[in-house]
Image (cartoon, grey):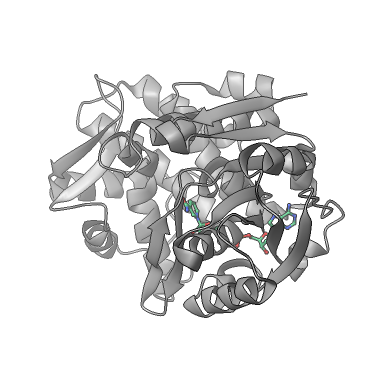
Amino acid sequence: VVVVRVTVDLAERSYDVVVEPGARHQLAALVAARAPRAAAVAIVASERIQRQPWFDLDPGVASSVVTVPDGEGAKRLETVEALCTRFAEMGLSRRDLIVSAGGGAATDVAGFAAAVYLRGVAVVHVATSLVAQVDAAIGGKTGVNLAVGKNLVGAFHQPLGVLCDLETLATLPERERRCGLGEIAKCWLLEGHDANELRERGEAAWVAAAVGLKATIVSADERESGARALLNYGHTLAHALEAEQLGGHEIDLAHGEAVAIGLAFAVRLAWRLGRVAESEVARHDAVLDALGLPRTLPDGLSHERLLAAMGRDKKAHHSLSFVLDGPDGFELVSGIDPAQVLAALEEFEGER
Ligand SMILES: NC(=O)c1ccc[n+]([C@@H]2O[C@H](COP(=O)([O-])OP(=O)(O)OC[C@H]3O[C@@H](n4cnc5c(N)ncnc54)[C@H](O)[C@@H]3O)[C@@H](O)[C@H]2O)c1
């Protein structure tokens, strides 16, 4: 049984992330230890989450379940207003607590409501999707979407604790699982592990490794100036692929699949730029294959459009920037010649 407790080290705002089958049963102990004055708890979850057999959360003090829409549809300012209204009706005070239960959409919107209700109340995330466990619940980024773009309104609000219950993953739909596997592949590659270790150690250990990496990076760099940028490995092309998808192009990639393709591309670009040996490309391919993730470009995409979309990526400040592996390890590389990226795309397409 994998049991991991990782500390996100942020001085007086430090907290633990517990990765364990049945971790949700530690909620009452966590509330007693971290929010001893809390007299009321609002548990924020969608109906779909509330229907799961493991939805039996007990914070140890009086609690009410507050229902939000399921998935991405919850990430709207409207939901934040509805949540804060319910919190006020419940008489939730600054010493009380909000608990999110669900995937990244739930942790994002409940976390944001917690950040703004009464100018900030404490939040605990019970992360139930692979994406929430390895990524969204950790690090304090919260927010909602606007009609004009994703995650445009938000706040940094670190939780008091995160419970990643491996038992809940049993009910996670396969496509949602693949979303998380993309992030796991990213972390596995950033950590320098190979496909053999991946097969030997199994899913619980993958989650633990990804949680460990995210916790380490957030501890070192809470607000994404340096090290945190590494977590965007594979995401430059992934975001461009997703932009094409939104633009109505006939591709149907889960976020994790887009990230996987982005990882395969990034290592090929690093190879083309003379930064890594061919064995590094092979290591990436083997890890992606072992996780059953795609690593070739979907059919019929315009390379020029992908290039333009990668230039627009909000994390690429001026010219083209990619997180790339290299002689000094992984780093954010800026000022990459678009012609090289285009040539790498052509070659990547040729592998299909
Ligand atoms: N704040 C951050 O740092 C951060 C990082 C990564 C992603 N995100 C955000 O997270 C969101 C994606 O998260 P996600 O992939 O978890 O999607 P999601 O929250 O939309 O969940 C996907 C679906 O899976 C369901 N689900 C979740 N856990 C389940 C379980 N154990 N059993 C059955 N069904 C379950 C959800 O109810 C939903 O229908 C995006 O909005 C993204 O922007 C935020």
**Residue 100 image offset from top left, x and y in percent:** 64, 57
Q: Image height check: is 61 above or below 301?
A: above
Q: Toward which corner of the image does residue 106 lie, by quadrant?
A: bottom right
User: In this rendering, would 154 be left or right of 49?
Assistant: left
Is the N terminus in the top left, top right, bottom left or bottom right quadrant?
top right
Q: Identify which residue, 294 or 125, lies in the foreground.
A: 125
Q: Residue at x 80, y 38 (%)?
A: 22
> Which image quadrant shows ligand 1?
bottom right
Q: Identify which residue, 171 or 268, lies in the foreground.
A: 171
**Residue 84 image offset from top left, x and y in percent:** 56, 73
User: In this rendering, would 160 be left or right of 167?
Assistant: left
**Residue 46 image offset from top left, x and y in percent:** 70, 68
Q: Image height check: is 186 above or below 249?
A: above
Q: Residue furthest front?
A: 37
Q: Is residue 66 visible?
A: yes
Q: Image height check: is 349 above or below 274?
A: below
Q: Identify which residue, 65 or 339, lies in the foreground.
A: 65
Q: Residue at x 39, y 20 (%)?
A: 279
